[in-house]
Amino acid sequence: MPETDKEFILKSIKDNNVKFIRLWFTDVLGFLKSFAIMPDELIEALHEGIGFDGSAIEGYARVHESDMIAMPDPSTFVILPWRAKEEDGINVARMFCDIQKPDGKPFEGDPRYVLKRNLKKAADLGFTFYVGPELEYFYFKSSDVPPEVIDSGGYFDLTPLDIASDLRRDTILALEKMGISVEYSHHEVAPSQHEIDLRYMDALTMADAAMTYRLTVKEIAMKNGIYATFMPKPLFGHNGNGMHTHQSLFEDEVNIFYDPGDKHHLSEKGKSYIAGLLKHAREISLVVAQWVNSYKRLVPGYEAPVYISWARTNRSTLVRVPIYKTGKEKSTRVEFRCPDPSCNPYLAFSVMLAAGLKGIEEGYELPDPIEDDIFKMSQAEREKRGIASLPENLGEAIAEAEKSSLVREALGEHVFEKFIENKKLEWAEYISHVSQFELEKYLKIL
């Protein structure tokens, strides 16, 4: 680690009265894990890491091989604004960690390492992968069931000053203090549903930012007596939470998706990248929409993209290419619309990149765009036009992913096996559960 990085961190700790440094990492499912160290331990931690028991972390290691090292990434040092104690001036900072084995080699089960490995493959081809996700979420009065909304606004509604407006404002201010740039925020379609869009970044920085964003939304809400959730479909009869992910590849400062001579302003590599996303969409669905509840969102009629096709303006397609604006070559991008914000962003960005790169490497041909409203087409018409659908449930998604060599390679053998194993357990638990719907529908008539 450069001495300048260490000096900057130590000076920041002293100047800001930081008494605790939280070391963050994620498990295979994308749940944030953390433990705290004191400033006196930081220098040793930066050079040697901190040991912990990996057998207690989902998808990590078995008991007999459980020793792991959390190695802090000094570039991710920030002070957590919501943890400040005004009465005593004490602050808390955080750093993301790379997980290593005792011999210092990267641990294959670390989702951050999975993304780094896929980004290296892109880098070896000369590409830098940029992403800009749109993470939607709900505010509820509490975590009680059934959930109770705090507003009845709709898409882009300017509601009278209320707690939701204040929560969004405070969340954005907190993100900006941590160096996470926000493009804009607004009310979404469903009651009590909101969105804060992050300015595009390289994929690793964005994955860290997405994890920070989710926690920040929840922390700011909790400080105000409100519960925030990124659950894909918490309300029956309303739109669910999506994470439309804008993505592009650059060679140095040049956006390789852009071609001024093409009628869609898309290069051949850009077209092949989209074709890769479309061809492998069913295989990667399990990773970008990983929960039983994810497939309650991915149904026709709620703006959720379930049909495997692409377009420029048609938002019923799986992939959308925003219309080119003169002088905005760097903004040429692909929007993949089926992920939801409860996924593991490290793994989700990995499989999206893998699918797109496969398209480029194999020279996949992009079919014509579908600008008609696919939701209004009959099944026969969709079949005639070759429009397939995403998996309808978690079980179908597991089956598609399990036979996918692309997903196995992108995740690596360790994460692939652990992820599939966990999802099979979830699906088995779900299909054996007797729901309230079944009791109300069948108990009195059967």
Image: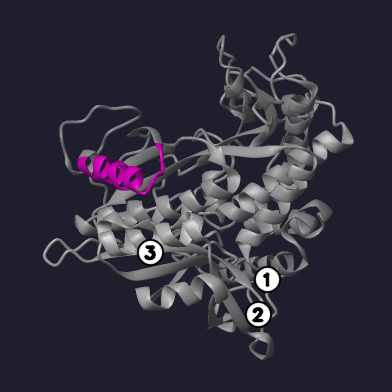
Q: Secondary structure at mark 2?
A: loop
Residue 101 quadrant: bottom right
Please say if 111 is above or below 350.
below
Q: Is residue 149 magenta?
A: no
Q: Residue at x 57, y 38 (%)?
A: 131
The answer to whether residue 393 shows anywhere in this view is: no
Rendered location of residue 12, percent (x, y): 33, 58
Q: Residue at x 40, y 69 (%)?
A: 22
Q: CA distance from mark 2 to mark 1?
A: 10 Å
The answer to whether residue 25 shows anywhere in this view is: yes
Q: Amino acid at mark 2?
A: Ala
Of mark 1 and mark 3, the one earlier in the sequence is 3
Left or right for 221, reference 350: left
Left or right for 439, reference 115: left
Residue 262 quadrant: top right
Q: Amino acid at mark 1?
A: Phe
Which residue is situated farthest in the left direction here? Answer: 87
Quadrant of image for the N terminus: bottom right
**Which residue position holds label 1?**
107
Rendered location of residue 72, percent (x, y): 51, 66
**Which residue position holds label 2?**
61
Of mark 2 and mark 1, the one earlier in the sequence is 2
Q: Nearer the viewer, mark 2 or mark 1?
A: 1
Q: Amino acid at mark 3?
A: Leu
Front in this rendered view, residue 60 or 230: 60
Q: What is the magenta range? A: 166-181
- Which colour assignment does the render follow? one colour
Q: Residues within 10 Å of mark 1 (few under 14, many from 20)?
A: many
Q: Secondary structure at mark 3?
A: helix
Q: Look at the magenta stretch and give its main secondary structure.
A: helix
